[in-house]
Amino acid sequence: MSSSGRIRRFLLCLLVIFGLSPGAKLELHDLTEMETRILKFNGSYLFTDQDSFPRSEVKGIIFGQGTDNRGEQKNTNQDVQKLIDAAKKAWIEFPDAKGIILTDDGHNILHQDGTRTYTYHYAYLICSEDRKDEATFRYPLEESEYKVKIGFARLIKPNGSVTELDPSQVKIETPSREDLTSYGREKELTFTLPGVEIGDIVEYSYEDYNFNPWSKELFQITYHFQAEDPVVYSRLVVDVPLDEYTAWKAYNMPKETLHPKIETKDGRKIYTWEAENIPAYIQEPYSPPHGDFIPKVRFTNQESWDWLFDWYASFQQERMKVTPRIQTLVDSLTGSASNEEEKIAAIYHWVQQNIRYISIKAAAGSSISGHPAAFTLERGFGDCTDKANLFSAMLRAAGIDSDPVYLGTNDDYPMLDPTLPLDYGNHCINEVFLADTNFYLDATGSANGGYSRYPSFASMDHGVYAVNAGKRKVEMIPVPEPDKQTRHYYLDLNLDQDGTLTVNYHSLYQGDYETDLRYFWNYYSKAQDRKVLFEQMVKDESPNAELLNYEVENASDISKRLGLKITYRITDYVKFTGPLAIFYLPEVSARYIFDEVGLTERKLPLSYYTSEGIQHHVTLKLPESWKIDYMPEELSLEADEVSYYAMYTFNSDVIRFEDQFKRYARIIEPSRYTDYRTLLNTISGYHTKPILVLVDQEK
């Protein structure tokens, strides 16, 4: 169907808006005004009780109006006045809000045949310039799955005048694609209510009829009752057949709204949750995804995970078949491997770097099932599910058991509750099984260009639940121990009599930090770019720094550990005060600046992507005649979430410094935050202490 044909179809749906009116006034472009009791629209012409007009001649429509004593047009509809009154009261209640959600009303209906209908009513008060974009409505379309019908849309002015949606402004558009790694076929139904100003109310309703769900057996809902703007009234209604199994949980809800109102009527069960006057959620830096802490309800018709396991596995097994081409490729990649881990590493690195990640949004064919492994191999690209299917097929061709698993990434997806079976996740990776262990790998390469060195995998996958349909289990992906995420820094320092410091720096990396850094240096692969970047790095240490030499080790070889080597010189590094030379170790303190503990207290957890480890190994050669006057004392700190040890020693003109930082926890709960913050600040403060040396001025 052509775009114009689709628009005409939606305009006919909008006829309900303009069918019969309690009274309306037409404003024509020639400045003529006409009042009418009846107003109909057929897509091209507006019909009044007196005449008909081409839509192009009509400037605007005001419905249900009367006149006040100043002659201004006023809407007398009770629902309009009720909204205006609610808006006035809410603006007093929330004077600093950029906007206020007056009505947030969602109704879900599961029909007996497995189809479902969702209707939504929304009203929003514009309180700032930042929120004027609320006058634009966008809704994704997939014509093979569901139909969308606009109930009504209007802009309400503070004086009561109402501008209804001009049907000709309803459009179907293809969203722009700025990210070339994401292809899509979906379209959007969109319109904009014109002339929006601060103090106006945007109101609309729509209906989504899903006649072809991915599965008619699965019905689930997640509904949020809080937003970044205050909410005056929010309601969730779920209407299902009386014999349908149902399970639900309410999270972070006020006690009075934890349990729904339940009605039975005409062979159906109707659940209703309501909430009122909910303040805006206040995001704190380094918080988990907001879906983890705002009030919400999750609802499902699944009694256990069994049906979902069967559904997922039916897709996966069919798409992980080992073809002759896959077997030949795997044999060539693993021919020189001496053990299973070397085989896994060879296949893991190959899939990351040879199968391009492209997100293909095409219903269940990509989001849940993916494409057959042979198809993904043939075309050389695929989304996360496609790559997970291929990776598992290749591992199986090497005699290694592996399954794709679904998860929600810890950067922006709410945590799964494993006690409530739901179709879940925004990402697909792999679980690998050896005789005595199992572990996870992510061959997607979406966020970091495909540079995860075995056995590391993307930190966005750490500490979240994974759904493995093949093994019929749901389990937490463990956060790696800090030892597997540690950065090692080796500094060989030489200090001259005049205070010039020469630094020989060597760093080695592992874990997700190595992955990101390898991606960075492959992106900046040109010699001139690298030189500029290394010069900036040493200048960050001191404006007097001069770069002497540099090297990136194993940037292009994903199978080997990434390292950096830098040699630089800093003049006037030491401050001389009488007989004392005062200085600090270079590099070290910059790694112990903890911006994440800037708040004095937290209401929300402090969330990291993964664990962390840092070690410094420093030797500093002093001029022969210099003697230590003061070095910071040994420091040892230990808590459940983090530990730190540091020690200076001095022998034969050489200062040695060793330390080890380990952060085990990914999530710091608010109850632990104060102690955790104190510990990190103690570490930072430790590195503000200088080294004092007595200088033999005669020499």
Image (cartoon, rainbow, N blue to C red):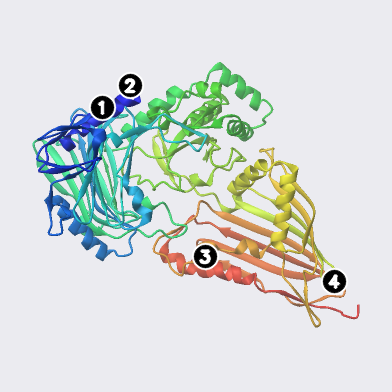
Q: Residue at x 63, y 61 (%)?
A: 591
Mark 1–mark 2 Cα distance, whole angstroms, equals: 10 Å
The residue mark sitting in front, 1 or 3, is: 1
Q: Is residue 493 left or right of residue 602?
A: right
Q: Earlier in the sequence, mark 2 or mark 3?
A: 2
Residue matched to label 2: 1
Q: Amino acid at mark 2?
A: Met
Q: Earlier in the sequence, mark 1 or mark 4?
A: 1
Crowd around label 1: few <14 · some 14–19 · many ≥20 (10 Å) = few
- Relative to the observer, which residue lies in front, 184 or 392? 184
Q: Amino acid at mark 4?
A: Asp
Mark 2–mark 3 Cα distance, whole angstroms, equals: 64 Å
Q: Residue at x 66, y 49 (%)?
A: 509
Q: Is residue 570 left or right of residue 152?
A: right
Q: Quadrant of residue 381?
A: top right
Q: Earlier in the sequence, mark 4 or mark 2?
A: 2
Q: Secondary structure at mark 2?
A: loop
Give the position of the N terminus as an image quadrant: top left
* Residue 534 visible to an observer of this rendering: yes
Q: Which mark is residue 9?
A: 1
Crowd around label 2: few <14 · some 14–19 · many ≥20 (10 Å) = few
- Residues under numbered marks 2 and 3 in contact, where contact means CB atoms less than 8 Å apart: no
Q: Earlier in the sequence, mark 3 or mark 4?
A: 4
Q: Amino acid at mark 3?
A: Ala
**Residue at the extreme top of the image, as rendered:** 324
Q: Position of residue 640 (x, y in %)?
A: 50, 62
Mark 3–mark 4 Cα distance, whole angstroms, equals: 43 Å
Q: Amino acid at mark 1?
A: Arg
Residue matched to label 3: 639
Q: Earlier in the sequence, mark 1 or mark 2?
A: 2
Residue matched to label 4: 498
